[in-house]
């Protein structure tokens, strides 16, 4: 069975990632794998700390520095395992028993790429360990993972709340169509209130696209409502989430007119940055 891959670090978002992973696991029956990645070791200090001292003392100092470096690496490993242990305890406390952990070394995107084939969804917090110092910015790892991943990326909000009402942004592009297809095939969405919305001027083409998406969901047993609303996507979608009490936003990572291999679509970036609810992104 495909796993729920949940990326945890030492940030304030990690508890939310665990809570959302448990929620998905309870609805789908999928196992959870918690992953913590230890970054590449920092480059060695290039300064000569030994100074102009005798060779024997210099050798002794270099040995001590090497021992300190080894101790630091050991402590970083211990911290990583402690993060995973705490995360596992949170998921199991929510009633999920199929939980595994994995401590990896190297680059986060490389680690995700190695596990992606067995993933049904990848969970990550909106921001990392510097969250409180970068409230206006997305985590750099989030943007890299969205660009690289071929599986849905679930961007956890700062705190978990029960999810019952889902807003799906539909612009007719390939990633939006993939999002609707994913919803239709997934065991996560039956029983949730799903609302399909297109932002723009009303046209027969837009209305027809929404009806086709609605029919696809209906064939999967999901009754969805539809709407076409005027305005700019970033503002209109954000206002709907706040005003109408949506608990989750699903959207394509790129609009159909975006240069997809260079940037995340500007609407997507703004929605992830500003929304206080989880955002599920599809490439």
Image: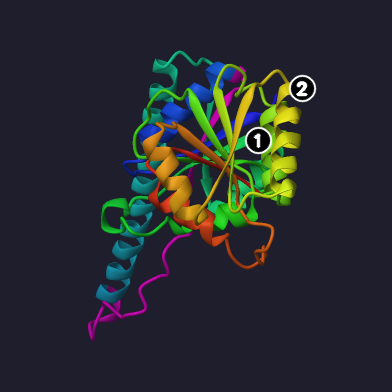
Q: Nearer the viewer, residue 95 or 74?
A: 95
Q: Is residue 178 visible?
A: no
Residue situated in front as seen by the camera: 159 or 148: 159
Between the C-alphas of marks 1 and 2, the distance is 25 Å
Q: Picture coordinates of residue 47 (x, y %)?
A: 32, 80
Which quadrant: the N terminus?
A: top right
Rendering coords of residue 70 (x, y %): 38, 54
Give the residue furthest to the bottom.
52
Q: Circle 2 sits in a helix, a strand or a loop, which is it?
A: helix
Q: As displayed, is residue 203 above or below residue 240?
A: below
Residues at marks 1 and 2 touching, judged by CB atoms closer than 8 Å = no
Residue 9 location, quadrant: top left
Left or right placement of residue 200 versus residue 82 in this view: right
Q: For the residue carrying disc 2, how many other residues have a C-alpha within 10 Å: few (<14), some (14-19), or many (20+)?
A: few
Q: Residue at x 69, y 50 (%)?
A: 203
Query: Is residue 21 rendered magenta in the image?
Result: no
Q: Is residue 199 visible?
A: yes
Against 127, is 102 above or below?
Answer: above
Residue 219's mark?
A: 2
Locate residue 132, reporting x and y percent: 26, 52
Query: Which of the two discs, 1 and 2, labels the residue nearer the N terminus?
Result: 1
Q: What is the image's colouring? A: rainbow
Q: Nearer the viewer, residue 37 or 282?
A: 282
Which labelled disc corresponds to residue 119?
A: 1
Q: Which residues are magenta?
A: 28-56
Q: Residue at x 69, y 34 (%)?
A: 182
At 37% from the left edge and 39% from the top edge, which residue is drawn? 242
């Amino acid at each position: 069975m495909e796993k729920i891959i949940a990326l945890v670090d030492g940030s304030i978002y990690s508890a939310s990632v665990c809570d959302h992973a448990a929620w998905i696991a309870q609805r789908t029956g999928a196992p959870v794998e918690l992953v913590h990645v230890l970054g590449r070791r920092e480059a060695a200090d290039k300064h000569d700390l030994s100074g102009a001292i005798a060779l024997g003392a210099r050798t002794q100092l270099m040995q001590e520095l090497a021992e300190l470096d080894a101790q630091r690496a050991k402590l970083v490993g211990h911290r990583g395992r402690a993060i995973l242990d705490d995360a596992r305890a949170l998921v199991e406390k929510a009633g999920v028993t199929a939980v595994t952990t994995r401590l990896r070394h190297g680059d986060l995107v490389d680690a995700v790429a190695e596990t992606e084939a067995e993933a049904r969804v990848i969970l990550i917090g909106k921001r990392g360990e510097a969250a409180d110092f970068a409230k206006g910015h997305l985590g750099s790892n989030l943007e890299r993972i969205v660009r690289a991943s071929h599986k849905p990326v679930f961007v956890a909000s700062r705190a978990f709340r029960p999810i019952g009402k889902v807003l799906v942004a539909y612009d007719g592009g390939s990633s939006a169509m993939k999002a609707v297809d994913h919803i239709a095939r997934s065991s996560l969405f039956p029983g949730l209130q799903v609302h399909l919305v297109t932002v723009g001027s009303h046209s027969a083409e837009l209305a027809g696209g929404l009806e086709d998406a609605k029919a696809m969901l209906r064939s999967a047993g999901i009754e969805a409502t539809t709407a076409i609303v005027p305005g700019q996507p970033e503002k209109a979608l954000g206002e709907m989430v706040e005003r109408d009490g949506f608990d989750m936003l699903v959207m394509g990572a790129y609009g159909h007119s975006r240069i997809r291999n260079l940037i995340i679509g500007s609407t997507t970036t703004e929605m992830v940055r500003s929304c206080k609810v989880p955002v599920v992104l599809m490439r």
